[in-house]
Structure formats: structure tokens, C-alpha cells
Amino acid sequence: MEHILKAQQFSNREDLDKIFEATDWIRKNPNPLFFKNSGYIMATMFYEPSTRTRFSFETAMKKLGGGVLSTENAEEFSSTAKGEVLEDSIRTVSVYADVIVLRHHIEGAAERAAEVSDVPIINAGDGAGQHPTQALLDLYTIQRECGSIDGKTIALIGDLAHSRTIHSLAYLLSNYDIKKLYLVSPEFVKMKKEIIYHLAEHNITIEITSELAKIAPEVDVFYQTRLQKERFLASDFQMYQKYHKQNEFRIDAELLKLMKPEARILHPLPRVGEILHEVDSDPRAAYFRQVKNGLYLRMALLVMLLNGRYIIK
Ligand code: ASP
Ligand code: CP
């Protein structure tokens, strides 16, 4: 692994298994200090807001014994504010850091960064593009919570057009023999054609629907997302407001009654009303366990990336 830019890089189940094995190992050995005395530094450059991704990468690096450089709100607090282009900022930071975690509002920004960087770039979300490390932790969560990914019926719900975590997860799921993939969204935020083609090429059975309650009894994994407000242009903002208010795909206590007892509900978070708080105490609500998995998985990825080995033993 050199850079982590998009989920299509993970097109081999053996590689995914190795990442999950390493994550399991870290879970059992949560303070392994692999980077003690290494001098390794990770820079987080965030041009968009974040709670989980930035904090989890920074916690991961610190727990491994490495150092962290950070600019949140890089648009304002780095020399971007003076007009510096991304490529120059990346070239500069790659002099100081051994790995750069980049979140940017422009799709393709991580790939641009990788072209000029001397150190690995981790795409922590590029506009409405991808968020591969989130999808890896989502997949790991499905495997851990459900025992396997093969044979499962999975529903991707919400803003399929703009949700970068859904895009990455859909690519990763194409490595598995899942039973069925439901794509559940309002028409105006439906899944990109290129991803549908990719899924079809990988023999994934897809059904597009807007009837969440109807399919709920057969779904094993509900992957809920918010409408990505920041991606809507002023011209379609009214549409956003209408659907956000209407919230027809909301997960609430009523929907829980229709779900299988062993189903699981995931969400990359933040949520803004699409899963009600009344759902949180149900054992099927896996989204905060998912957050914890993210820390372990990112620790595993950093070790694999910087120490160049797959299995940590
Ligand atoms: N936190 C995730 C992302 O940055 C999901 C979201 O914001 O809705 O893509
Ligand atoms: N899931 C996720 O990426 O969360 P943040 O936007 O808070 O980092």
C-alpha cells in the first residue's frame, strides 16, 4: 500500500482479511506503541469539518507512539487562505510528515495530492467522491457484527448521490457474495451510474426502491446516511429542505418493530434526524460500536502503511 485514495484499490479479499485480522489484533492489544522511537509524524490536513475521522486518526497515531501535526479548517488556518494551491501545501507538508491524512471539498483532491507527495496520502473524504477508510471500518463492522458479509442483504439508504462513504462501501461490497443490495433513496439523490455498472459487473443483485418499511423484514444491514447538505447548490436547496423535513427514510421505533432481531443499523455519522435517539438503546444499533472499530482499524492501517507489513503479530 502506498496511498489510500479510493476503495477500488481494495479489490482482493485476502488484503481485506489481512486488514481485519490486524484490526482484531489491535483490539486485543490497544496500546501497542509500534512507533515509539520511530520519529514518525502524521499530518492531518482538513479543509472540511470532522469529528470522528480527524480525532480517530490522531488518537490512533498517538496510541501507536507517533507524533501529530494538524490543521483543521485548513481553508482558513493554513496558507491556502493566502492563495496557496493544494499541490504546494502538500509538497511542503510532505517535508515534515511521514503520512498525510487529507479531507477536502473537491472530488479528486486526494489523487492530486498523491501526485506531488513524497509520503503516503490517506483520503479522508474528497467532496462527493470517496472516503475509503470509513468504508473499510464499515465493512469490518458488518463482518464483526454479523459474522460474515457473504450472504447478507444490505440496504444503502439516504443520499446515494453525494455520500462518499456509500460510494466507497459499494465498491468494497462488490468483493463479496452478498445476497442482495437495496439502494433506497429519493429519486433526486440516486446512486451514480458508474457505481451501479461496477456492482452489476461484479454480479451484485441490486434493487432500487423507495419503500424502506416494505423491505425492512428481509434486510440484515441498514446503512443509513444523512442528506449531504453541503453538496447542494443554491438552486436545489429547496429540494434539500423539503426532503430533510419529510425524512421518509427515517429509522425510528416503528421501523425497529419490522426488522429482524439480528439485523444491524450502521451510520457513518453525523446523524441529523435520520435515526431517532429512541433507537440508540436497541442492541441492533451498531453505530457507536462502528466508531470504536474506526479507531482500531485506523491504527492497523497506519502500522501497515508505515511499517510496511500486513499482519501484526
Ligand atoms: N462523516 C461522513 C463523511 O464525511 C458522513 C457524513 O458526513 O455524512 O463523509
Ligand atoms: N464518519 C465521518 O467521517 O465522520 P466525521 O465527518 O465527523 O469525520
Image (cartoon, rainbow, N blue to C red):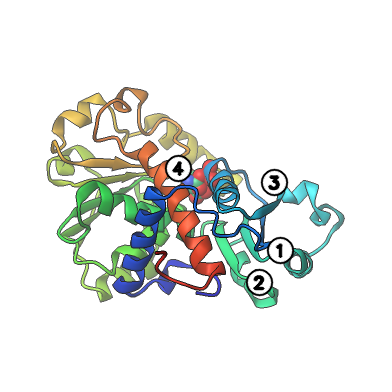
In this orientation, does residue 282 appear? yes
Q: Earlier in the sequence, mark 1 or mark 2?
A: 1
Is label 2 or label 4 in front? 2
Q: Quadrant of residue 267?
A: top left
Label 2: few (<14), some or many (≥20) within 10 Å? Answer: many
Above/below status of 87 relative to 34 = below
Instruction: Give the SS element for disc 4.
Output: loop
- Distance (Cα) linking label 3 and label 2: 20 Å
Callout 1 touching callout 3 (CB < 8 Å): no
Question: In the rendering, at what x and y percent does residue 94 appear?
Answer: 73, 68
Q: Earlier in the sequence, mark 1 or mark 3?
A: 3
Residue at 47% over, 40% down: 239
- Distance (Cα) linking label 1 and label 3: 16 Å
Q: Earlier in the sequence, mark 2 or mark 4?
A: 2
**Residue denoted by label 3:** 72
**Residue denoted by label 4:** 227
Three-letter amino acid code of the residue under disc 2 = Val
Q: Is mark 4 within 8 Å of ligand 1?
A: no
Instruction: Give the SS element for disc 2.
Output: loop
Q: Quadrant of residue 102?
A: bottom right
